Amino acid sequence: MKRLFFFILLFSLTINLYSQDSVTFINTLGEKERAAIGDAVTLFMHVTGRTPRGFQQVMVALKDAGVVTQTEYDQNAALRRGMLARMVARQMNLRGSLLYILFGTERYAYSACISEGVMDPGGSEWDILTGEELIETLSRMSEAMEETR
Amino acid sequence: MKSGMKIFIMAVAVSMSINPLFAEIKVLSVNGNVVFKKGQKWEPLRSLMRLTPGTKVSTGAKSSATLQIEKHTLTISPMTMIKIYEGGDPPKKIAAGDTFAESTTKIGLRRGSIRAKIFREQRVKTEFKVSTPVATSSVRGTEEIISYGPGRGMVIKVLDGTVLGENRNGSSKYLKAGLVFNQRPVNSDPEPLLAHILDNYIANVFPAGTTSDEVSSRGFSREQFFENPEGPGEFLETKVGESENSNVNLFIIWE
């Protein structure tokens, strides 16, 4: 009985610690002038209700889910709008852009995200995103997915 | 000892009865990971807590919180950060002996989205302001959803009542239910209030006498264009609950 109580306590503490990390992560990310690929995949996991555990494991999980096509990325490399657009387009299974369906490139994924209202026009797929921009995009993706449910 | 206990109980009772007179920001519910900051440290937010002006509240992914600020209800969406600048005080009388009072609530929205249901009391001038880096929303009794992000800017969706949206340049627009105010950071003026639905139609209807130049420039000034038509008979005037028949000539231009 004591053991069971101990495990329940440990489990609830772990959940609480993780929970705290999720919101702390977002607040820290909001201060960043330049978001990294590692930030994007970690936040992506949080937003889609999955637990991020290490960069490589996250990349494998996202590849298995069909969100990314490869796992070899530098987690500290700057996040570009095109890469995020492609992750979002794959997660949302966007079918609104014929060119994106045909070619599946980051450029057309960005166009598909604009027509879906998840991203804004006036930029390029090569733009480097700030932490706030990353949070805003994934927040809009989450809202759009909730609305379609 | 007994008298000491009595004094203690009385002090607690008095403090509990006085406390709501100073500030009434109550946490009604918390879902998921929500923290608040008063001073330097973020701490977990829990239901039934009481907050004071100057507090920041931040929600995590898939998390939300509902606050009661005086009689207003504020729902904070996931991945949002707000600061409560002012609010929770009971309505103050405008002048000594005056039967009218005023209640002010000021919120700063740094990121994310909030839904505000503002309670309007008779004889109380209610002001509920939500500010973002690009614009401010002022409400006097309504329900609205406000969001802010660096790309889209500030968006106010009015669900009920009337809202005044005003940007940093002083350009303002009154909104009613169904209208959307959107001030993008890169623009000097807000988007047209019907921009979110104008592009959803396969046909556009223009007032009589519209020239092709005016049609081609609708992207720049479509709202003013629709609000201030020139020439008689372009709009039907009907009262609520009434209907009116009218002949409309449509010239369809296939583009």
Image (cartoon, coloured by chain):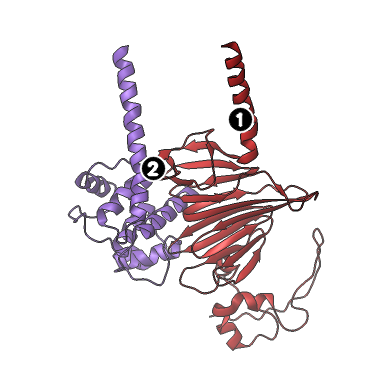
Bin the neighbour count of mark 1 within 10 Å (Cα to Cα): few under 14, some 14-19, many 20 and up: few
Residue B122 circle label: none
Number of numbered callouts drawn: 2
Q: Mark 1 points at which residue?
A: B15
Residue B41 circle label: 2
Residue found 59% across the figure and 60% down from its top: B137
Which percent across, then down, holds residue B13? 63, 25
Q: Which amino acid does label 1 sit on?
A: Ser
Instruction: Give the colour in which the image draws chain A.
Output: purple
Helix, strand or loop for disc 2: loop
Q: What residue type is labelled 2?
A: Lys
Which is more toward the observer, B51 or A116?
B51
Q: Quadrant of residue B240?
A: bottom right
Residue found 62% across the figure and 40% down from its top: B22
Q: Quadrant of residue B161?
A: bottom right
Q: The red chain is which one?
A: B
Bin the neighbour count of mark 2 within 10 Å (Cα to Cα): few under 14, some 14-19, many 20 and up: few
Contact between labelled residues 2 and 1, with CB atoms less than 8 Å apart: no
- Mark 1 vs mark 2, foreground winner is 1
Which is more toward the observer, B182 or A21?
A21
Are both tags, 1 and 2, on one chain?
yes
Residue found 54% across the figure and 46% down from its top: B53
